[in-house]
Image (spheres, grey):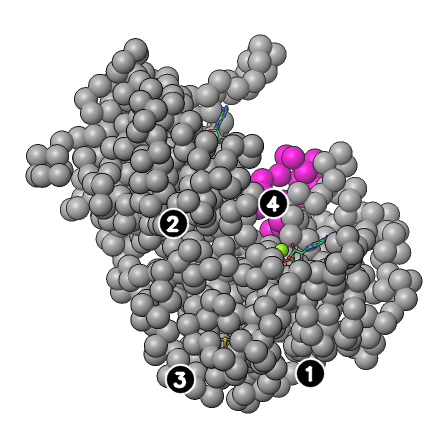
Amino acid sequence: MGDRRMTQPMIQMENAQLHYKIGNAISAMMGLPSTVKAVDGVTLTLNKGESVGLLGESGCGKTSMGRILVRLEEVTGGSARFDGQEIKDLSGDELRSFRSRSQMIFQNPFDAVNPRYSIRKTLEEPLANARIPRDEWHTRVIDALELVGLGDPKQFLERYPHQLSGGQLQRVVMARALILQPEFVVADEPVSMLDVSVRAGVLNVFRDVRDRLGLTAIYISHDLALVRYVCDRTIVMYLGRIMEDGPTEDIVHAPLHPYSQALVAAVPTPHVDQSHDPLPIGSGAPDPRNPPSGCVFRDRCPRAQTRCADEVPMPRPIGTRRVACHFAEE
Amino acid sequence: MADTLLSIQDLSIAYQVGALDVVAVSEASFDVPQGAIVGLVGESGCGKTTMARALTRVIADNARIAAGAMQFAGQDLAAMSEREMNNLRWRDISFIPQSAMNSLDPVYRVEYQILEVLRDRGGMSKQQARARAVELFEMVGIDPGRLRDFPHQFSGGMRQRAAIALALALNPKLVVADEPVTALDVIIQRQILDQLRSLQRDLGLSVIMVTHDISVVAYICDRTVVMYAGKVVENCDTATLLNEPLHPYTMGLKNAFPDLQSAGTGVLTPIAGSPPDLIDPPKGCRFAPRCPFATELCRSTEPPLTEAAADHHVACHRADEAATLREVAQDPATWGTAA
Ligand SMILES: Nc1ncnc2c1ncn2[C@@H]1O[C@H](COP(=O)(O)OP(=O)(O)OP(=O)(O)O)[C@@H](O)[C@H]1O
Ligand SMILES: Nc1ncnc2c1ncn2[C@@H]1O[C@H](COP(=O)(O)OP(=O)(O)O)[C@@H](O)[C@H]1O
Ligand code: SF4
Ligand code: SF4
Ligand SMILES: [Mg+2]
Ligand SMILES: [Mg+2]
């Protein structure tokens, strides 16, 4: 992959929205909210070969973003493009090609595979769906297993999911996502179900494969320590919006958005001398059905002013970053 | 050192599976000092939950305490009758189960479930119980106005706080919490740990905190017990454990953990292989098949848990070489590649 590839956008989102419909006619008559704004006005460019971590609390819209980008959902407003093409308009051959170029790795490996399929069949299924000629299957399967570090694939081919450890199965799930040689991968909390001692191995494989294949990748997590290990760039989300976007190291060492500051401060470290200062954030979980006016973070923000209730802060460039806060410089 | 509140001595707990015994906790020993938070860490399946449950004797039907003692304030919990034990539960020792998030009964209002404990177990009048419920909610940081909610109206964090409130209802001396923050986001996790810490200080509680996360242990636990495949392999104060571990497994765990405080991203090193099957554990040291420092002795003879340094217990034949092993353990090449 040359320079040309590195600077071409793979993903472009412009004011993208994904509003899920909830409730029914009666709740609507009662004036209750009828949508959840899972993704609400996201603008973002991801160049080919770039990796970004999507960070934020449960329910902030990380998985929803991923689902738009592999077309498990369609944007309900704005635009989401893959390699220049509007994802929701793809059809026919273009859609089939998109389905192999863009893949998602799900959180729980045990949910992601059919327990009655052998590992061989698990890996052959996407090949069949993509109409890959049958005589290529075996080589492809072996290559994919080797890619994720399951050397000696013969040992695994005829086994069933329950006969593998969690770490091995997550590698199989990864192999399945990679077998069609995608250019873009969304990994949704791929190690959260794994034991600590094997987690590191799966993360290393992910990093290694991504670098070797020059993949464009989105890595979803609520743990900045993991995101930092995998991605040079991080996007912090809150209630469907981008709060901060920039180099991971900058965010780790000097977060600018008040929400990023709380997130960084909240991560425990394996040291007894870590800070125990109270978090700079109000408690109370955000409610995506009823976000506050203006800045969606303002009811928990220690720095909120009257302007924050009236005016939505748009992400604006500050140095190496984009930050959505009226007072980010202060 | 503070007085010992609970002393676990050579405790073994077995599950009967068909004709076989799975010894999930094997000859475990450690002390819980009065007023301390003690962490119990290890990988999934190493016996943490089994141990935690045994302390209140809420164990599975196919489980039994096969050997050992649990000395609590002068009495052996392992030898108590079910009636005596029942008197102790909630009042002296309370347990927050691993799935505490889902442990509230969905069909009853939260208040009802708290009142039930206060009245049935604490012998309070309805009025006293009401007042106490309000007090408890305030203590754990939930608006008492939410007492009449159903559990599904609570977020995960609120349910976890409610479970803590319930555990504190009758002023126990010891709270055993099984993975109380594992399923939660970092921000909520932090808020709950802070709450637990300040309650523990204010009330002079002792806490056993089960977790698989050494960062959580570093944040909140005074002492830490490391388990591997049903065995206690290391036990000391948390600072010593993290700075100068004596057991190779503890060294490996540290290498596998991301550290936001480190200067760069560094490398995470997995421990190759996986924990042994407890139906047929390996002879000798149970960690030997994954240990880069294993010798012939390790593979044939089980290392006993000994006090290798003052108040620092470890089960490893090579504990006296730990300083050297720690150096070598920092090199990722030591741990080979993961399977
Ligand atoms: N199919 C759906 N219908 C209605 N609401 C939904 C649907 N899927 C998700 N949501 C809501 O959209 C919001 C964003 O959800 P999403 O799954 O994207 O969050 P997330 O950031 O991935 O969270 P987590 O960290 O818990 O996985 C949440 O409020 C969620 O409840
Ligand atoms: N009811 C049961 N019957 C048989 N084996 C069990 C039962 N509960 C747990 N085990 C086994 O006991 C061991 C320890 O389990 P557990 O205490 O739950 O570990 P942890 O909490 O550390 O993950 C595991 O091998 C587990 O499979
Ligand atoms: S815009 Fe206002 S409320 Fe929002 S993060 Fe900035 S200071 Fe806080
Ligand atoms: S006893 Fe031997 S195998 Fe076990 S941890 Fe110590 S060195 Fe490793
Ligand atoms: Mg999600
Ligand atoms: Mg457990």
Q: Amino acid at mark 2?
A: Asp
Residue designated by label 1: B3
Q: Amino acid at mark 1?
A: Asp
Residue designated by label 4: B158
Residue designated by label 3: B323
Give the answer, above or below, for where B270 lies relative to B283.
Answer: above
Separation of marks 3 and 1 at Cα, in angstroms: 31 Å
Q: Left of B98 or right of it: where is B224?
A: left
The numbered mark 1 sits on a residue in which chain? B
* Residues packed near mark 3 inside 10 Å, few (<14), some (14 to 19) or many (20 plus): few
Residue designated by label 2: A152
* Residues packed near mark 2 inside 10 Å, few (<14), some (14 to 19) or many (20 plus): few
- In the rendering, at what x and y percent does residue A49 appear? 19, 39
* Mark 4 or mark 2, whichever is nearer to me: 2
Both marks 4 and 2 on one chain: no
Range of magenta residues: B135-161
Mark 4 or mark 3: which comes first in sequence? 4
The secondary structure that most of the magenta stretch takes on is helix
Separation of marks 4 and 1 at Cα, in angstroms: 34 Å
Mark 4 or mark 1: which comes first in sequence? 1
Decide which of A97, A141 is in the foreground and name it.
A141
Q: Tell me if label 4 and label 1 are in contact, CB under 8 Å.
A: no
